Amino acid sequence: MCRPSAAIIRSGFAGAVANPRSGYTPPQMPAAVAPAPLAVPAADAPVAGLPGVGPRQAQRLARLGVGTVRDLLFHLPRRYEDTRDVRPLAELHPGEEQTVYARVRNVSSHRSPRKRMVLVEASLEDGGHVASAVWFNQPFLARQIHSGDELLLSGKVKLGRGGLVLQNPEFERASGEQRHVGRLAPVYPETEGVSSRWLRSRIEPLLPVADALEDPLPPQLLRSHDLPRLAAALRQVHFPDDPARLELARRRIAFEEMFLLQLAAQRARRRRLAGSGVAVAYDVEVARRFVASLPFRLTEGQRVAAHEILTDMAGTGSMNRLLQGDVGSGKTVVAAMAALMTHAAGHQTAVMAPTEILARQHHATMEALLAPHGVSSRLLVGSTPARARREVLVGVAAGHDTVLIGTHALIEEAVVLADLGLVVVDEQHRFGVAQRQQLRRKGALAPNFLAMTATPIPRSLSLTLYGDVDLSELREMPPGRIPVETRVVAPHQRPEAYDFVRAQVAEGRQAFVICPLIEESDKLGVKSATEEYERLRREVFPELRVELLHGRMPGREKEERMGRFAAGEADLLVSTSVVEVGVDVPNATIMFIEGAERFGLASLHQFRGRVGRGEHASVCLLFQGSPDEEGSKRLEAVAQTRSGFDLAEADLRLRGPGDVVGLRQHGLPEVRVADLLDTALLEEARRAAGDWLDADPELVTHDPLHRAMNGYRAVFDLD
Ligand code: ADP
Ligand code: MG
């Protein structure tokens, strides 16, 4: 149910503002100056022009993504300072962070003798007890604090020569309506010149605007889930009365986020399944012949995935399936089977891959798998010569070529397919949502869609987030693979590692060396491929054949160099992340990764997948460029985890859901408040969305809900 709010509320007791233990009650004083009645601005009004927001401040707010009044209201705190436990001076204890009420007796400022900085000192008293407060380097405070002021002060208590001293305390006049001290005070994402204190003062007067905001969640839904209305939730999130109400407010905002996401996804899914897609009859004989023609037995996972795909494609709606499986788990074979079935039903297949190298490899594989069944595949990439390109275009437009494989080149307008029945996108997270949709739209009817990835997102996330995608997973490797041994190498073991490379090369093997950068940069200690290439071939391995490959080389050259390495004409390939996907050199047995901490876990896992593809035992050696604990932990996780699925879960635990393999890249909208690990809330939202759609499939009963769906058009097909 409710997750404890402790994580976002720092320090303090969960008591009320009036502290029952101290018997202290803050004075209820009328505000000294009655605030001028504020004209309530419109939610879409720009922040520039609000009281106290000039052009410069507006620019700074823009850096925080805040342009309008609405943005400011949705600029949500990341945590809270709890200073509600207000004590009388008599209860100050040295060594603690405390909040006290006191009257200022006297204010003075002087320069500290040794460190030459300005000290502002206030002597404090309350009920016969005295203490003092000191601020360093804030000389202007001497003009802001006056004797006789009644203040709430919050900070660290020290025992000085003259008694107890509050050092650099936060403070605010005690008015009975505290904004900063003596309450649960919001701490916002800040930027230079935009402090939380400043934001509190600007946001509070705008809260009435929230009352006029449209609440996308229908009242009956809020009632049945015991959640507050949007305006009330925003009020509590910015200025909470107590932790319980704050928790409920955050829950409401998180629920809304997940509910709308689920509603959009499930709606897209229902429409997809009910709509007219390309139906590809599941011809068991075709499947059997294909399987019989393979030089190996399918793994259980491949069999199940293929069956799921062929069953989906046979339906009248269109398929939308994601095939997740580690590098080398055999996704391509499954895709080939789907392409063959699509061909047998008289439709075409387009296969898109993120790099030319990968597209060529798929082409070769598909050719090998499908040619025996009378299907030849065509290749279309950026470097395809004009003449060959024309031929391909004519062939697919006329419909006699049924399998087209390529890169982004497939998306171009000139590419017209006569009857597209299946779209396969490999390493789908490498493409934008728009690119994937463009390819799908090349069909007259909605074609079946199969995305593949070797960078799985954790199952705990995918189940709830991929509302409109069905998942197939290849969790086992084909038999006979020797797992790649991964080791984090200490700096002093580097010579040993080089000796190991020499020994392997002497046995006829090859090695990759991956660097974080292409060229030398100011970043001290970060290896670049070009420098490392020079160093290795001149100083370390003058006797070996060293090759260089990076993404800034022309496509032709990249291919030639890759080709030479693949053909065994080079022993070492020094490169960058361009080899992350696709590269298949079974004779390579060493993956050397420099500055490994600079790569994401998923990338490291991909690199590792470049070796261990042949019959020889392989190793992956991780070198840390700049030692830090966080980095070491992540590298250890890679060394100890073999499966990409498990690694994705580890990544989720280490970094939190925010950063996991770019949810956006997977085509998911950013989630701002919802805790993606709060599976109970996600599940509640998922079920609520399904129930709502059962009762109101066209979202006609609550217009704001319908309008809220516009925000998801870029992600899901909602038209
Ligand atoms: P992925 O795309 O998932 O990384 P591939 O489809 O490229 O993996 O397959 C990797 C290699 O494994 C290919 O050489 C393929 O022929 C081979 N392979 C696929 N399935 C099997 C299997 N069931 N048994 C043995 N080898 C297989
Ligand atoms: Mg693949």
Image: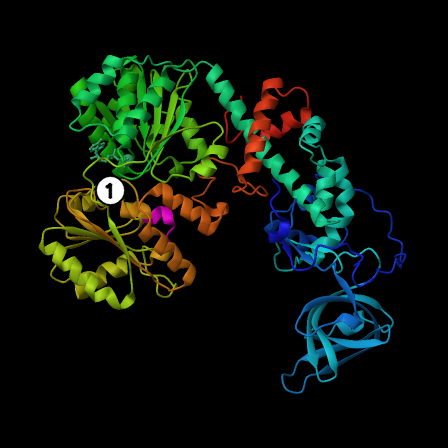
Instruction: Name the residue furthest front.
Output: 21
Residue 92, position as x, y percentages in the image = 74, 72
Residue matched to label 1 = 583
Above or below, 639 against 138 in this view is: above
User: Which one is nearer the viewer's eye here, 713 or 331?
Assistant: 331
The residue shown at (42%, 39%) is 457
User: Which one is nearer the viewer's eye here, 599 or 383?
Assistant: 599
Quarter location, residue 666 = top left
Residue 84, position as x, y percentages in the image = 74, 58
Is 577 part of what is drawn in magenta?
no
The residue shown at (70%, 46%) is 244
Whether residue 384 is visible, yes or no, is no
Could you tell whether 170 is left or right of 454 in the image?
A: right
Whether residue 392 is visible, yes or no, is yes
Q: Quadrant of the image for the N terminus?
A: top right
Disc 1 residue crowd, few under 14, some 14–19, many 20+, Cα 10 Å: some
Query: Taken as a whole, is the magenta stretch helix, strand or loop?
Result: helix
Residue 699, position as x, y percentages in the image = 63, 21
Ligand number 1: quarter of image: top left
**What element does badge 1 sit on?**
loop
Could you tell whether 150 is left or right of 582 in the image?
A: right
Q: How many marks?
A: 1
The residue shown at (30%, 55%) is 515
Is 601 part of what is drawn in magenta?
yes
The residue segment tinted magenta is: 598-604
Above or below, 673 against 195 in this view is: above
Residue 305, position as x, y percentages in the image = 32, 26
Above or below, 515 against 663 in this view is: below
User: Which one is nearer the viewer's eye here, 511 or 127?
Assistant: 127
